[in-house]
């Protein structure tokens, strides 16, 4: 099921109004000037750990410590060598990409970042390994990187000259029949929950909870995304309109903080850390090693609707866009429906939506008035016929069942020894190593669906679609969701705009993998930059009806200048306080993460201009 069809200019580091208050300034600056100006060291510089030091780290951990080299180094002399050919086999399978410590799921972003391996990677097998790595990085002033699924578009799971804490092997998943968060005994009722390791992928959680357990857990749509990273970003699934965000379903987490302590975070123990983890962005306040998530009853079935319509003229296209937006507002703006509609150059509209709580015929009947309107005019043709499908909800992430009963929707991980349940949606294959030209997103306020505002929205969509494809991800806005799930999401660190948005609009584009040294990789930078310009211009048209709209941290513009406000809005000041409490010296750094304005763009140099006044 296709979810997406899917810019280093110096990024400005302005602190928005939401972060300009004295409280947040004090929070991020409450360390000595001497410490604030001490940066990270690189290989070959004074202070870089000796080989004996690295050996001690290796001996202190049970995981494997590996010195990394450029992944495509074997292709430097000849592209026909067996080693070069073997390296190329790893970049077309997102499961395989995730299994390589020197690779990332995205190969880079034009003028922003390029996937490069860390100096060393510690493949952690348990929490003690992560404690050892955190203590080592803090003691030696190293740039620390954390990678689980490795899906960060912003390159936050990637940095050269760093120590990588790689959690892939910590992928255990277990269902807890009577879970109560530690310290909450007597105040919380036991519930069925699922505990997952930091390296688990969502398909691992779905297999345990849904396929084998017959229950639902709110997670990610792309099955190879890491559980820990998604929870820390907020997290949406196909059915978020019904079940809220993934972060809101977090019950407890185990976290290694910058001092090397292992902390439990939940509503009763370290509640401030718990809140920050729920949507505050991954890799900023600690290393999450384990998470426990709420599960729910599973509906009997899930369904989906697909079709593509082409309009014969620009005028007819505007009428089509108007009609389908009005139809969405009246018939689909509710907990039953999720996923997306895409509005494209060439006067086409693609619909790829899912539903829950309805049977197949009910889903088809809901669409019939709109379809009848389309059929009644010679101005429209179905380039892809209307299709409504239904399957048992327990088998929605069951690759073996889907291969037999819904062939063509999924792709299995066919490598020898791969877990039998590892599958991904066929449309997500295009994300394997993809190189980004541009990516922008915006929360679209539900007020734009009001009758007196729809014409403005429709005109903006049409202007945008003249330049680039724009997709409305309805499941990534919580307006229309149940009140209880909206309130649960309100108690997370995400930008509150998500609560009143009917969709997340995404305008994005890129090309196939462009890892450094990779044979056959594209190199038309001029075209990539031109595409980036068009993507920006397209989103600018849409933003005319949603000025100042926030953005989703995991799917956003690398070059945002007001990222603090866009990602977290009024919550950023509180996040800054949590950051200062648990990571006062700034060990944890990611691009546009909480507290990153105190560092250079690469995270190696502290910025004296961010020192506290009076120091």
Image (cartoon, rainbow, N blue to C red):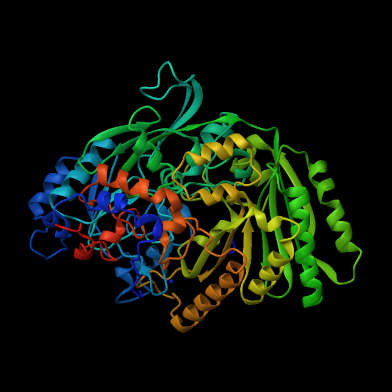
Residue appearing at x 74%, y 66% in the figure: 455
Q: Is residue 388 visible?
A: no
Residue 275, horizontal then vertical, whole percent: 40, 39
Q: Is residue 511 above or below residue 126?
A: below
Residue 577, horizontal then vertical, whole percent: 31, 45
Query: Which residue appears farthest toward the top when viewing the image?
Result: 186
Q: Quadrant of the C terminus?
A: bottom left
Residue 429, horizontal then vertical, whole percent: 54, 59
Residue appearing at x 17%, y 44% in the figure: 135
* Lateral position of residue 17 relative to residue 191, left or right: left
Task: Decide which of 489, 336 is in the foreground and name it.
Answer: 489
Residue 78, horizontal then vertical, whole percent: 33, 76
Task: Decide which of 317, 79 is in the foreground and name it.
Answer: 317
Task: Decide which of 49, 395 is in the foreground and name it.
Answer: 49
Task: Decide which of 487, 42 is in the foreground and name it.
Answer: 487
Query: Which residue appears farthest toward the bottom when viewing the image?
Result: 526
* Lateral position of residue 584 relative to residue 510, left or right: left
Residue appearing at x 63%, y 31% in the figure: 298
Q: Is residue 418 above or below residue 120?
A: above
User: In which quadrant of the rendered view does residue 360 lie?
Assistant: top right
């Amino acid at each position: 099921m296709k979810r997406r069809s899917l810019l280093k200019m110096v990024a400005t580091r302005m602190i928005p109004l939401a972060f300009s208050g004295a409280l947040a300034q004090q929070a991020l600056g409450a360390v000595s000037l001497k410490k604030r100006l001490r940066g990270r060291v690189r290989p070959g510089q004074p202070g870089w750990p000796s080989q004996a030091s690295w050996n001690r780290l290796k001996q202190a951990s049970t995981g494997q410590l590996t010195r990394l080299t450029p992944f495509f180094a074997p292709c430097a002399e000849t592209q026909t060598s067996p080693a070069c050919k073997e390296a190329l086999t790893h970049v077309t399978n997102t499961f395989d990409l995730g299994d390589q410590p020197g690779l990332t799921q995205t190969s880079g972003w034009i003028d922003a970042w390029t996937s490069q391996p860390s100096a060393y990677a510690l493949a952690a097998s348990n929490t003690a390994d992560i404690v050892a790595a955190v203590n080592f990085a803090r003691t030696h002033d190293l740039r620390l990187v954390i990678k689980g699924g490795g899906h960060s578009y912003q390159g936050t799971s990637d940095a050269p000259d760093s120590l990588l804490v790689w959690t892939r092997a910590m992928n255990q998943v277990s269902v807890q029949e009577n879970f109560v968060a530690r310290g909450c005994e007597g105040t919380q009722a036991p519930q069925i929950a699922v505990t997952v390791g930091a390296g688990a992928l969502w398909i691992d959680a779905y297999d345990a909870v849904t396929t084998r357990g017959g229950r639902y857990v709110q997670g990610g749509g792309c099955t190879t995304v890491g559980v820990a990273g998604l929870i820390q970003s907020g997290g949406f699934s196909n059915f978020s309109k019904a079940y809220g965000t993934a972060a809101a379903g977090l019950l407890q987490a185990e976290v290694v903080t910058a001092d090397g302590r292992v902390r439990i975070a939940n509503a009763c123990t370290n509640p401030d850390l718990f809140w920050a983890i729920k949507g505050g962005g991954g890799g900023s306040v600690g290393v999450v090693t384990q998470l426990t998530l709420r599960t729910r009853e599973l509906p009997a079935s899930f369904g989906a609707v697909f079709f593509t319509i082409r309009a014969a003229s620009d005028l007819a296209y505007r009428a089509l866009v108007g009609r389908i937006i009005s139809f969405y507002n009246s018939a689909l703006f509710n907990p039953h429906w999720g996923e997306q509609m895409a509005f494209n150059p060439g006067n086409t509209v693609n619909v790829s939506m899912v539903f829950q709580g309805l049977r197949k015929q009910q889903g088809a009947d809901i669409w019939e008035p709109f379809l009848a309107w389309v059929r009644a005019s010679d101005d429209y043709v179905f380039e892809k016929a209307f299709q409504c499908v239904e399957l048992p909800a327990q088998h929605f992430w069951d690759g073996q069942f889907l291969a037999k009963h819904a062939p063509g929707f999924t792709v299995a991980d066919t490598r020898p020894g791969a877990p039998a349940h590892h599958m991904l949606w066929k449309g997500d294959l295009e994300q394997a190593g993809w190189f980004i030209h541009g990516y922008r997103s915006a929360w679209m306020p539900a007020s734009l669906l009001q009758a007196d505002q729809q014409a403005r929205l429709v005109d903006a969509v049409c202007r945008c679609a003249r330049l680039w494809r724009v997709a409305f991800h309805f499941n990534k806005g919580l307006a229309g969701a149940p009140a209880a799930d909206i309130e649960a999401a309100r108690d997370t660190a995400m930008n509150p705009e998500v609560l009143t948005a009917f969709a997340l609009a995404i305008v994005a584009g890129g090309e196939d993998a462009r890892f450094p040294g990779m044979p056959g990789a594209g190199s038309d930078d001029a075209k990539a930059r031109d595409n980036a310009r068009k993507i920006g211009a397209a989103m600018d048209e849409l933003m005319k009806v949603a000025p100042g709209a926030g953005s989703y941290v995991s799917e956003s513009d690398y070059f945002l200048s007001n990222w603090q406000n866009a990602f977290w809005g009024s919550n950023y000041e509180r996040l800054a306080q949590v950051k200062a409490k648990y990571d006062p010296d700034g060990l944890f750094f990611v691009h546009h993460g909480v507290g990153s304005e105190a560092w250079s763009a690469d995270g190696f140099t502290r910025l004296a201009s961010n020192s506290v006044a009076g120091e």
